[in-house]
Amino acid sequence: MKKLILHTLKEKQGYVSGEELSNSLGVSRTAVWKHINELRKEGYIIESSSKKGYRLTGLPDILDGREVSVPDGQQIGRELVHFADIDSTNNYAKKIGNDGCPHGTVVTAERQTLGRGRVGRLWQSDNSRGLWFSIVLRPDLEPEKVQIITLAASVAVVEGIIEVLDINCGIKWPNDIILGSCKLGGILTELSAEPGHVNYVVVGIGLNINQDSGDFDQELQDKAASLKLFTGKTHSRAKILSGILKSFEKIYTMLLAGETRQIIDKWNKYSVTVGKEVRIISREVEYIGTAQSVALDGKLVVKCKDGTLREVSSGEVQVRGLMGYARD
């Protein structure tokens, strides 16, 4: 009922009488009034007039299905599950992935208590100022080709931010989103698979949106960025998420159509790693080289100091740009 009231108030863009709402929804005016008050408690600013009715004048910055816009025909985000608090959106996405949820289902949260990045690193996501969400995909891909989904997701994030805010971000291989010389966010891709078959893929994305410097732990304050710190403005998380989901649909469609080369070309365009000196660290060896490009399977091609080329898998190593993250 509240969703229908919101839809009507947004559509009218002015005052709507209590009688009109009552008649169109088939409930009493008292019931309308109760739902209006519930919406106010959730952060919606709704003015009331005894002669004119109700008018919506402000929206809360929440990440549920009422505020995240998904165009008709778009699969990514068509089903959206929202939590105020959760341990990890990826954990829940894997659960519903196992339960058979539809392709494109998105899980969002205002706060994660156990948010994580690659190699189990904790990801600070303890307030309603960032984007913490996971997407469940059911691709017709072989398990060894799933790595390309992480690169596709990073392109989708960067192009979504460009579309909504006209802010250029970079990508540090394999999964970091960079703004200026600091980390804006990251991507964690997990999958359930059998030999030769992927059951589902979960793409977890965390982005810092409206944090102030004091919101980050002391050791992160010179490493982490937020869009607010970069622009000096507060941004609508719901609009940014809507833009990223739209961009993800476009890039994922390209992937399924076999347009991997075009996606890799986009990735290289936004890369802050390609062309830079990097240090490769693995359990077996550590060496320095120059990042040349990303191969079609998502591996990083590194030219070693002796002139040999090595392909590096994100699942095997860590890559750090020695000259900093900033793009030229």
Image (spheres, helix red, strand yellow):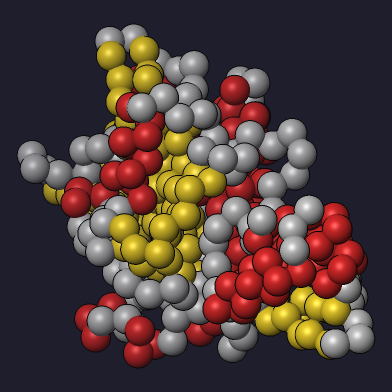
Relative to 184, does residue 286 appear above or below in the rendering?
above
What residue is drawn where x is 61% and y is 64%? 238
What residue is drawn where x is 37% and y is 20%? 199
Along the line of sight, which residue is nearer the eye, 182 or 47? Answer: 47
Kindly indicate the quadrant of the structure image that contains residue 213.
Answer: bottom left
Give x and y (percent) for residue 295. 45, 31
Give x and y (percent) for residue 298. 42, 33
Lateral position of residue 161 relative to residue 48, left or right: left
What residue is drawn where x is 46% and y is 69%? 130
Give x and y (percent) for residue 293. 47, 41
Relative to 307, does residue 205 appear above or below in the rendering?
below
Screen quadrant of the C terminus:
bottom right
Residue furthest to the top in view is 196
Q: How many marks?
A: 0
Along the line of sight, which residue is nearer the eye, 300 or 205? Answer: 205
Along the line of sight, which residue is nearer the eye, 54 or 150? Answer: 54
Residue furthest to the left in view is 284
Give x and y (percent) for residue 260. 57, 27
Residue 48 in sight here: yes
Lateral position of residue 166 relative to residue 106, left or right: right
